[in-house]
Amino acid sequence: MKLIQTVKRRIGSEDKKAAQRGTGSNNETKGKAASSAGSAQTQVRKPQEKIGSFTALPKLREAPAGERTELFRRKMEACTVVLDFTNEATQPEREAKRQTLLEIVEYVNNTRNCFNEALMVDVVNMVGANIFRALLTRNKDPLAFSDPEDDEPLLEKAWSHLQIVYEFFLRFVVSNDVDPKIAKRFVDQNFMLKLLELFDSEDPRERDYIKTILHRIYGKFMALRAFVRKAIQHVFFKVIYECETHNGVGELLEILGSIINGFALPLKEEHKDFLIKALIPLHKVKSLASFYQQLSYCMAQYVEKDPRLSYDIITSMLRFWPVSITAKQVLFLNELEEMLELTQPSEFHRVMVVLFRRLALCIRFPHFQVAERTLFFWNNDYIVKLINQNRRELFPIILEALYKSKHWNSAVHGLTFNVLKLLMEADPELFDECSAKHPRNEEDEEGKERERQRKWAVLQNMYDERRS
């Protein structure tokens, strides 16, 4: 922004000088006309002058070898100028800059030791001037219904330049010529914060480039690793507790998936805190469907590293259970099955009662997708094995739900009978015992319901007597 303001001030001073040269006589009208003519000449020359800043410099491959480093620096300096893509009059300038950007990328690809310490500041300044900007956002009516998956992304108009700049910066980050101990003075914490803000871009092409670059920086710049994790954690806090919408959560979780995979054992407390405080609460976010797969992968990575964490994940999911959102319940059930496949019998024993009370409610849920997805748990051999090992505690809960399930959907009916058959084959004696208790349990519940209605009637009579 400061660079743009400087350019505008220079243009304004040139206009004033042109106006003063045009006012040769004392006639005010002629003076104004001359000033306008001078301004018009400046506006006409301005694009040509900017084009000249790119074309005046010779080609890098044609320059003598001893002058290429300085020419490379000057071309990067010329590319710090940000052009207006909303104005068609700047098309020649935009094309000239694009060709210059392509040229410096080609130079980097074909030249060894092109990123010395003296040029690093120019590289970072050029990249920052182009990519750090106010992101485009669309104005949405909060009362209007819209499906985020159906909305077309808002593509960046300057992508023809941004793509080459990102490609250039990626070459810089992965280059063997770049010593991270030196480069960290320029690719610092402030730079990383600005880079993370760009993950909220609506353009998926840009987010994909930033994801790759951030992953490479995390792998190369050891000193920035803890800061990057903390900064990502703050992004998640903002999504969980403030805005609930962020375009780049999925990409950030993809990076975290590979980071978690590289954690050393035993897990540090800070890594466990990250799971408990930042990752698990993401299940509460309304836009979970947009990053569910990446979040589920991160959960699985943690459980593979430390199976004891399955207890924390499952109990937290039960606490955040989306009672009234069917699609989200199906996502939770999908993830629960994945978690149970990784859960050790000791951890399963701690959580099984509260878990299967929730699953019993899902079996009786009116929406067929929720009931059907829950009954599919019995297609998983490992989960069936865990259930059979703890059948004394779980069979009564499951059978009660199955007997009460009077679902309208024929597919759910078929699955219900299949599960009943599996339970009967697993332990016929226990099955008969639980089945015999079911009529008595129903009678007890009907008696409790009658007593509840009687108490309400007494309270209603007392209220009516006081009013009368």
Image (spheres, rainbow, N blue to C red):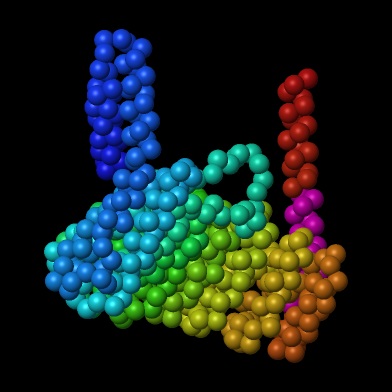
Task: Give the residues drawn in magenta, as a range.
Answer: 434-451
Residue at 31 percent across and 10 percent down: it is: 27
Q: Quadrant of the rendered structure where residue 140 is?
A: top right
Residue visible at 38% across and 38% down in the picture: 44
Q: Nearer the viewer, residue 22 or 199?
A: 22
Q: Residue at 14% x, 71% y: name it.
A: 66
Q: Nearer the viewer, residue 327 or 15?
A: 15
Is 384 within the magenta?
A: no
Residue 383: give x, y in percent of width and height. Answer: 61, 82
Question: In which quadrant will I find the N terminus?
Answer: top left
Does the rendering let one see residue 297? yes
Residue 189, given in percent of the width and then of the height, sits at: 24, 57
463 versus 223 height, above or below? above
Which residue is drawn at the image coordinates 25% and 71% (left, top)? 62
Of all residues shown, which one is farthest toward the top?
Answer: 27
In the figure, 404 relative to 83: above or below?
A: below
Which is the main secondary structure of the residues drawn in magenta?
A: helix
Q: Is residue 302 visible?
A: no
Q: Is residue 444 magenta?
A: yes
Percent coordinates x, y for residue 176 in the rendering:
23, 78
Q: Nearer the viewer, residue 414 or 396?
A: 414
Which corner quadrant of the image does residue 416 belong to? Answer: bottom right
207 lies above or below 373:
above
Q: Is residue 309 left or right of residue 7?
A: right
Q: Quadrant of the C terminus?
A: top right
